[in-house]
Image: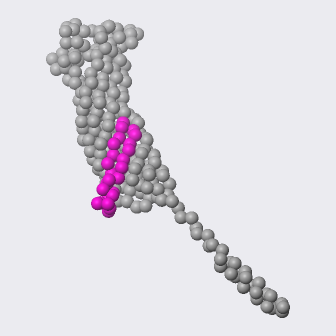
Amino acid sequence: MPRSLIAAVTLLVLSVTAVAQPVPVPARPVRVGNVNLLTAGGGAAEFDHENFDSGAYPAITYQRRVLRREIRPVPIWLRAAFQYQSDDARFHGYTVWNESDEMPFPERQDGSPGVDERTRDIAVRFEALGDFLHAPWWAIYAGGGFVMHSLHFTSDGVESGIPTFEASLTETSPSALAGLRVFSPTLPYTGYVEVRYGRAFGKTSDTKTKAWLTEVTFDFTGVNALFVEGGVGFHW
């Protein structure tokens, strides 16, 4: 058989074999859903209350996108969040006295423990958000809702020996916010930073007719507060 014919047959066989080989398809990145979001972080509160100092706090949030088919241009979310604020104080002065104690005396300053007070605010927020500006990697959102505060206060004058005073209250306040969220279409990681308007609560300083607080005159009072919060988490 002529060499030229052998070469032609060989070339034809190689061509057919090459065509028969499956062409590898480049792997497409897997897109991660952007329907559920769970984050953990914290923030700082700024407000002016006589008996409750502003400071940092932890926060955990979960939000879910709703009405995905009905409202496509502006993604709508419902969110529930938990935050905890606490303020501890030790000073020399009057604790919260029983109304029948007509002659209270201040905790002395000559080495005595003084008065220990603690204010605690466990808050659960319920908010509706809208991504009014959004792109594949980020979203600017705003919204509002309300906050349920579980308030608890204790006051203990160690030297006086009177029973520790305790008071609790459930309070509701409004919440308005705006923020920036960044995320990845192919990775389940997200982060956010936001500014929120709300309320903060502490013990009253209005002693009414006496120079010290009593069980009857004690109350919680609220002030406007500005919160700056951020966190990281997962979306799916």
Q: Nearer the viewer, residue 53 or 172?
A: 172
Q: Is residue 2 left or right of residue 56?
A: right
Q: Which residue is drawn at 32% across and 62% down?
A: 73
Q: In this view, does 211 lie to the left or right of 158?
A: left
Q: For residue 33, what is the image quadrant?
A: bottom left
Q: Is residue 28 magenta?
A: no
Is residue 112 at all visible to an observer of this figure? yes
**Could you tell me which residue is drawn at 69 percent across and 78 percent down?**
17
Q: Which segment is the magenta one? A: 59-83
Instruction: Where is residue 208? Give x, y as percent.
Output: 16, 20
In reply to whether residue 70 is colored magenta, the answer given is yes
* Display coloring: one colour
Residue 137 placement (x, y as % from top left): 44, 58
Question: Considering only vertical position in the picture, is 175 above or below 156?
Answer: below
Q: Which residue is drawn at 32% across and 25% down?
A: 119
Up-down relation of residue 75 to residue 208 (above or below):
below
Q: What is the x, y in percent for residue 2?
A: 84, 92
Query: Is 148 displayed left or right of 229 in the figure?
Result: left
